[in-house]
Image (cartoon, coloured by chain):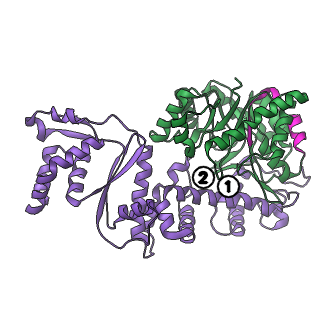
Amino acid sequence: MPNLGVGVGLRTTHYAHILEQEPEVAWFEVLSDNYMHTRGRPLEILDRIAERYPIAMHGVSLNIGSTDPLDLAYVRELKALRDRIGARWVSDHLCFTGVAGRNTHDLLPLPLTEETLRHVAVRARVVADVLEAPLVLENPSTYLEFAGNALREWEFIAALAEEANLGLLLDVNNVVVSAKNHGFEPETYLAALPMERVVQIHVAGHTDHGTHAIDTHIGPVPDAVWRLYGKARELGADASVLLEWDAEIPPFDVVHADALRAERLVELGAAAGF
Amino acid sequence: MTAHAPALSLATLEDWLVAVNTEPGELADALERAARRCGVNATAADDLERVVTRGPRLSALERLSIYRDGYVARLVECLADDYPALACALGELEFGRLARDYIAAHPSRSPSLDAHGAALPAYLDTRSEAWARCASDLARLEWALVEVVHAETKPPLTADAVAGLDPGDFARARLTASPALRVLGFAHPVNRFYQAFCEDSAGELPGPESSAVAVHRAGLSVYRLELEPTMRLLLSLLTGGETLGDALATLERELSPAELTHVQTHLAEWFGAWIAAGFFTALELP
């Protein structure tokens, strides 16, 4: 999948600025679910933005790990939206959001077992068949681990990516958050991932409560996340970069300027050897 | 990773975690109900850590609470986004209480958060608080605003197309309403309250006074047009699919002579304004 450069997550508060000012941005990531259950204004705005900018789709409701039947109607709607706006790829999260028809609208952690691995791999392959393209999955932020886990998350993701031919969306902020919450070294996590499968990198901010960290997407991106981003680049992740900023969102130019730090880090990193 | 961890299936663990997150009441109550529902006996601290591990600094219970608190907060925030004037009118505490009761009564079953607030107006009709009737009216107005944002729009019927209608065909003509139009009647002046909210000058919820409004989207903008009672009746008949002739005949039956004279005086003006606003998308002759 193409490296689109440094992009920004499209947020409603920036619609007017983007439509009126047409800022120079390499690409936008759109939240798929915001445009799938509407025939109205959000879709009309997205159509206009997609005419001008490359787009990638990022969702939160695929429910890939659930033991409920895979919602094929949802997957077909994803495909229809992708085809409508010419999105370069479709991503979601390694998680489950609900079961037995109940939806928490949260990215709930999966038990990291062989059973889960087989279950998710089968479903990811079905999704890829419907999409006629590899599914891209993101490592989530998690706040608990199951006592029955047989694998660490990085082992699980590496095995799943191979088994289901996944593209990976590496969220380095989520690695920092989960590392704090579970007590592992972020570098250990990155070192185990197949970087050649990383098609996109997320950078974002989080809120550190001392005892734990929450993935709030509040900006600007902290140095610890940028450092891990640099490490990912060093390990060979040559992928599109996207800044997520969802809390206390400032004017568009502020968000974009923070995202562009990724480019400067690449230049600095290249000089430093990665 | 722990030798004594029970071998719980993926399905069981998922059912349990969702139940712990979504069962109403306190976390301890939710754990009891989740245990009964899923057969996961994890209600005391020791039992719980056989299912969810203790973290470096948080207990298993504290780690579960992060998800459980997030579930409620996320849905309350979503409702406040859909019903900002109602949230402002009730205040954070009262709105939060209402939202949590609603979430308990209407847990989300859709992949989309957009649909979750749809039943709030009807839910308010079941509440006994003094403010509930007005709150229900205000919620219906705010949900109509949500609906028209997400409704498809089609090219509007033009004034030229109406002007081209043969006068002899006028009575049997039927108009097609825009999918992005809602005509609403209320027992409280909630559009006036909503306008005050938009201007940052809303006070307490108003007392009873009938009112009506047309909510409509054209392009990217959403409009609210206050309707007087006879306007509302005529517009409701037309958007309900009656022919122009049948709608006018209904008015003749339903209205007093003075009201009918009022309609006849303003009919062309109203009709012209509705066409200009894009309330209708087609005109057909059966």
Label pair 1/2, CB-CB below 8 angstroms? yes
For label 2, the crowd category at 10 Å Cα-Cα, with few meaning under 14, some 14 to 19 and many 20 or more, is: some
Mark 1, residue position? B18
Front-lying residue, A179 or A51: A51
Numbered badge on residue B278: none
Q: Would you say B141 lies left or right of A144 here?
A: left
Task: Specify whether residue B152 is painted magenta.
Answer: no
Mark 2, residue position? A102
Q: Quadrant of residue B59?
A: bottom right
Q: Quadrant of residue A22?
A: top right
Pinpoint the chain carrying mark 1: B
Q: Quadrant of the C terminus of chain B?
A: top left
Q: Give x and y (percent) for residue B220.
A: 43, 41
Q: Colour of chain A?
A: green
Front-lying residue, A7 or B168: A7
Front-lying residue, A194 or A74: A194
Identity of the residue drawn at 40% across and 53% down: B144
Give the magenta part as a residue range: A185-203
Q: Is residue A147 visible?
A: no
Q: Give x and y (percent) for residue A142.
A: 77, 50
Q: Is residue A49 visible?
A: yes
Three-letter amino acid code at the position of disc 2: Arg
Q: Would you say B27 lies left or right of B101 here?
A: right
Identity of the residue drawn at 39% across and 60% down: B195
Identity of the residue drawn at 50% across and 41% down: A37
